[in-house]
């Protein structure tokens, strides 16, 4: 499913199993859960394209929207 109207922040906020998502992405990227949490909260962006590709695959959010703060539902 594609989530065109969401970004990573809103996707994460709406998840029921937040910890499971963070751990899964961290494992796939071979990074700490803390690093992935920073992405989810918009504190920083992934340093490698392969990490962005993993986020796109796991969330269904188009790459252009992942970090688009204009799509935040809570801001």
Image (cartoon, rainbow, N blue to C red):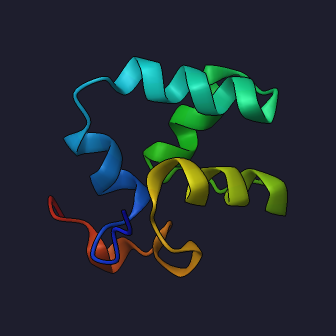
Q: Quadrant of the C terminus?
A: bottom left
Along the line of sight, the residue nearer the viewer: 23 or 60 = 60
Give the residue furthest to the left: 74
Q: Above or below — where is 3 with respect to 53?
A: below
Judge left or right: residue 46 versus residue 21: right
Q: Quadrant of residue 31?
A: top right
Judge left or right: residue 36 versus residue 5: right
The residue that appears at 51% across and 74% down in the rendered structure is 62
Judge left or right: residue 52 versus residue 31: left
What is the x, y in percent for residue 15? 26, 36
What is the x, y in percent for residue 39? 56, 47
Q: Above or below — where is 23 with respect to 66?
A: above
Q: Quadrant of residue 23?
A: top right
What is the x, y in percent for residue 60? 46, 61
What is the x, y in percent for residue 54? 68, 50
Q: Quadrant of the N terminus?
A: bottom left
The residue that appears at 75% across and 51% down in the rendered structure is 51
């Amino acid at each position: 499913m594609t989530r065109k109207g969401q970004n990573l922040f809103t996707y994460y906020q709406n998840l029921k199993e937040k910890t499971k998502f963070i751990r899964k992405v961290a494992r796939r990227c071979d990074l700490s859960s803390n690093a992935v949490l920073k992405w989810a909260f918009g504190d920083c962006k992934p340093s490698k394209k392969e990490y962005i590709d993993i986020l796109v695959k796991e969330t269904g959010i188009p790459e252009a929207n992942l970090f688009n703060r204009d799509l935040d539902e809570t801001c």
